[in-house]
Image: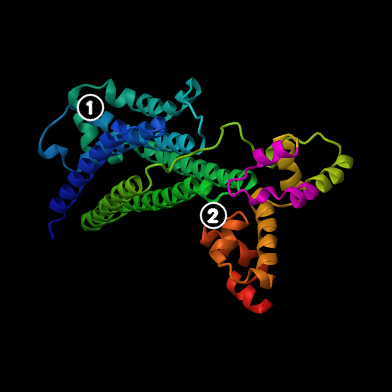
Amino acid sequence: MNYDSIISFLAVIIVILFLLFSVFLLSVKSEKKLSNQLLAAFLIVTAIDISAFFYHQFIEIPYTLEILRNKISLFKNPLLFLYILSVIYSNFRLKWKHLIHLLPWLLTILVLLPNFFLANEIEKAAFINNYSNNTEVQFLSYFGDVLSIAYLSAEIYYILRYRKLLLENYTDKNAFKNFNWLKQLSILLFIGQVLTFIKSYIRVNSNNNSIDVIRTIVLLFGVFFICWLFLKAVNSPKLFKGINVDLKTSKEIKNTREEVSINPKIALLKDFILAEKPYLNPSLTIRDLAELIKMNTRELSVLINQHLNQHFFDFVNEYRIEEAKEILKNPKEKELTVLEILYQVGFNSKSSFNTAFKKHTGLTPTQFRKNQI
């Protein structure tokens, strides 16, 4: 099998698709313009990196440009990390402090400066021909692996923190679409990172045939990834709706109130919920509830998440389920369908209602109704 042709063909396809999708992201009108720009930049940098598989068949570039092209891949992790932050936070903006993400690239240039960038053309050629055996390159390879793991860990941390913030502040399942998108993205990126590590290991420790096989697998994964991105963009054009960058989890909020004042506030909260039934609003947020009971949002968050040991999402859904149970037990309401009931008690999808109902009762709504009969 001629792996060189297959690898070159796949690389060309990926570069073309990445660049076309980047043009789409940069030209489409969207409220999340910065997110689109960061994702486009990530795809462009990745396309430049992947071009190493075929560009030498068409052009020759100076050694200095070749190394700079090679090291542009160091921008992939920062761009992806900033992209994830821009999706999570609706008011995310690039600031001067984000220039810190340039440091790995600057460090790489400094490491290569003495024996490459300041060397003559003959010495540069020797450096390129013996590339993998150079001490600087080996050090930078390990440094890059550590950096990739650090960025991936940071991305996972922020995505999990995002989920916690959603659970503590929202009850509408639609608010979780953003999180589901980022979760899927992080899983695919993790798979891609694992394949890259395997490729790096095989390149050092195995034969040419093995490295060609893993390169082909990596490129096929790249084709799948860009097709997945395209389908996501087509099917969910209004996917991204982030949260405020200043929003904190209940544990991050310093609670300086006296514990003695907690019980009356819990009683006030529960009495209000039962009397006014704000949970019937399918889009209820913790900010909405705080305004209704004239309480500070952060104080309410601490009250529910720390003192009642529940996420706001579960706290509100518990009342919705109790309301649904009363309707399902009422023989006068037997003509109501499960779909009608779920909308009536504040849910906006059958799947989320069934999941929450079974979590609280161990039964589906239909099973619960049959047991009552």
User: For the point 62% across and 48% down, which residue is it?
Assistant: 281
Secondary structure found at label 2 = loop
Q: Residues within 10 Å of mark 2 (few under 14, many from 20)?
A: some
Toward the left, the furthest residue is 58
- The amino acid sitting under disc 1 is Leu
Which residue position is annotated with label 2? 348
Mark 1, residue position: 65
Q: Nearer the viewer, mark 2 or mark 1?
A: 2
Query: Considering only vertical position in the picture, is 233 above or below 359?
Result: above
Side of 35 relative to 246 (left or right): left
Relative depth, front residue between 3 and 272:
272
Segment colored magenta: 270-293
Residue 42's spot in the image, x, y percent?
Answer: 34, 36
Q: Is residue 63 above or below residue 184?
A: above
Residue shown at 51%/49% (left/top)? 174
Residue 220 location (% of width, % of height):
26, 54
* Image quadrant where residue 78 sits: top left
Q: Residue 357, position in %: x, y?
A: 62, 64
Of the 4 image quadrants, the one containing the C terminus is bottom right
Q: Specify whether 228 is left or right of 336.
A: left
